[in-house]
Structure formats: C-alpha cells, structure tokens
Amino acid sequence: MKNNLIRDFEAASRRGLKHRIEYFFIHTYKPVMDDAIIRYFDTMGDYRRWCETHLPGWLGYGKKI
C-alpha cells in the first residue's frame, strides 16, 4: 500500500501545473442547483427559503445540516 502511495505522489509531482490544477477541481453535480443557468432572488430570505424547500438536505443549504 505504501509503495502505491509513493508511486502516485511521484507521478503527480511529474505533472505540469496545468494538469495538477485540472485534477484538483472535481465537479460534482448538484441536483436543482445545476439545472438552471441563473436564478434571481429579491432578498437573502427569499434565497434561503428557496434553498430549504427545493434543495436536498445533503447539500447543506438548510437550517439544519
């Protein structure tokens, strides 16, 4: 196991900065949030109510996590 980690680290250290940055950011699909290009809310309260009623709890936008 340790040898695999060392090999992975050495391989990563040989990659250029561009590739390291690409591997650093992992896009995770977020239901509802990613389904519209843009949303507008008149107040922060409107936004928070929308989050509580439309988003799954595991995204962490509700009052209780």
Image (cartoon, rainbow, N blue to C red):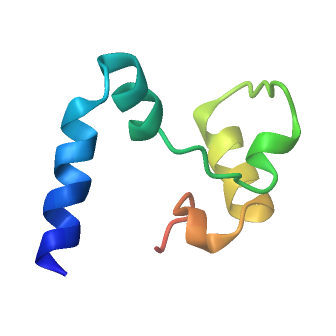
Residue drawn where x is 19% and y is 66% of the image: 5
Q: Which residue is most to the bottom?
A: 1
Residue 42 in percent (x, y) is at 73, 24
38 relative position to 47: left or right: right
Residue drawn where x is 87% and y is 35% of the image: 36
Q: Which residue is most to the right?
A: 36
Residue drawn where x is 62% and y is 42% of the image: 45
40 vs 29, nearest the viewer: 29
In the rendered view, tell whether residue 64 sits above or below residue 13.
below
- The image quadrant where one finds the N terminus is bottom left
18 vs 44, nearest the viewer: 18
In the rendered view, tell whether residue 49 sits above or below residue 63.
above
Marker count (numbered): 0
Residue 18 in percent (x, y) is at 40, 18
50 relative position to 62: left or right: right
10 relative position to 44: left or right: left
34 relative position to 59: left or right: right
1 vs 33, nearest the viewer: 1
Which quadrant of the view contains residue 31? Answer: bottom right
Residue 15 in percent (x, y) is at 31, 29
